[in-house]
């Protein structure tokens, strides 16, 4: 009985000392900060699909003028880069809210997105339509889309 009491006393002393010196996990330490998880996907395109602001083409036959990339579970943001073989930045419409036709709400990219774009809940595929801008209210991109690659970096955090 004395030996058991001695072991309990020793264990209690160790726990108290560890707690006072900060070696026991705290509630904040138990909460782990969410890690950024990224995935990169690429797709090739050929040509452009209409003229932005005039007759924007639909994404009917990828890779002709558009690409479609699957969005995986947990991916909430995407950064898009369009690398055209002509070497000039090209205009793209990025459908992060879902796609049904060219008039669906979308984001505009000239060569690359400046910051990650939020993906709407429930969207399962990213549609990127390459268009030739006509200028107007927005600054035109330098070159028309010819042949190239759309690179999308998906992530769970911005």
Image (spheres, rainbow, N blue to C red):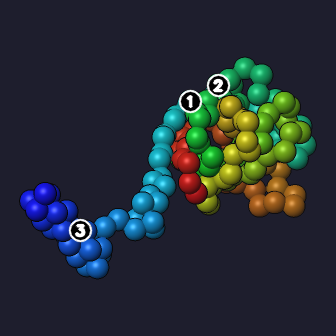
The residue sitting at 62% across, 49% down in the picture is 77
Neighbour tally class for label 2: few under 14, some 14-19, many 20 plus, Cα within 10 Å: many
Q: Is residue 24 above or below residue 38?
A: below
Image location (x, y in percent) of residue 18: 24, 72
Q: Which mark is residue 105?
A: none
Is 15 displayed left or right of 6 in the figure? right
Above/below status of 83 relative to 140: above
Do residues under tags 2 and 1 come within 8 Å of each other at their CB atoms? yes
Report how far apart the C-alphas of labels 2 and 1 lie in the structure. Answer: 6 Å
Disc nearer the start of the sequence (3/1) = 3
Query: Which x, y percent locates residue 72?
Result: 58, 33
The 10 Å Cα crowd at callout 3, few under 14, some 14 to 19, many 20 or more, is few
The reply to whether callout 3 and callout 2 are in contact (CB within 8 Å) is no
Identify the residue shown where x is 10% and y is 62%. 2
Other residues around mark 1 within 10 Å, as few (<14) / some (14–19) / many (≥20): some
Tell me the residue that label 2 is attached to.
63
Q: Secondary structure at mark 2?
A: loop
Quadrant location, the N terminus: bottom left
Tell me the mark number nearer the camera, choosing from 3 and 2. Answer: 3
Q: Is residue 42 above or below residue 10?
A: above
Looking at the picture, how far across and down is residue 32, in whole percent? 44, 58
Q: Quadrant of residue 61?
A: top right
Nearest the viewer among 41 and 56 is 41
Q: Secondary structure at mark 1?
A: strand
Q: Is residue 95 visible?
A: no
Q: Earlier in the sequence, mark 2 or mark 1?
A: 1
Q: Residue at x 77, y 22 (%)?
A: 60
Residue hosting label 3:
12
* Residue of label 1: 44
Report whether residue 98 is seen. yes
């Amino acid at each position: 009985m004395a030996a058991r009491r001695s072991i309990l006393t020793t264990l209690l002393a160790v726990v108290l000392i560890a707690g006072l010196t900060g070696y026991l996990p705290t509630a904040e330490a138990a909460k782990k900060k969410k890690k950024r998880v990224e995935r990169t996907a690429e797709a090739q395109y050929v040509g452009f699909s209409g003229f932005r602001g005039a007759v924007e083409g639909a994404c009917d036959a990828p890779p002709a003028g558009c690409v479609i990339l699957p969005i995986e579970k947990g991916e909430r943001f995407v950064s898009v880069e369009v690398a055209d073989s002509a070497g000039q930045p090209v205009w793209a419409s990025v459908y992060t809210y879902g796609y049904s036709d060219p008039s669906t709400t979308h984001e505009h990219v000239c060569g690359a997105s400046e910051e990650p774009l939020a993906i709407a809940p429930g969207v399962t595929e990213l549609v990127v339509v390459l268009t030739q801008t006509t200028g107007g209210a927005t600054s035109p991109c330098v070159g028309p889309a010819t042949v190239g690659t759309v690179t999308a970096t998906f992530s769970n955090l911005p």
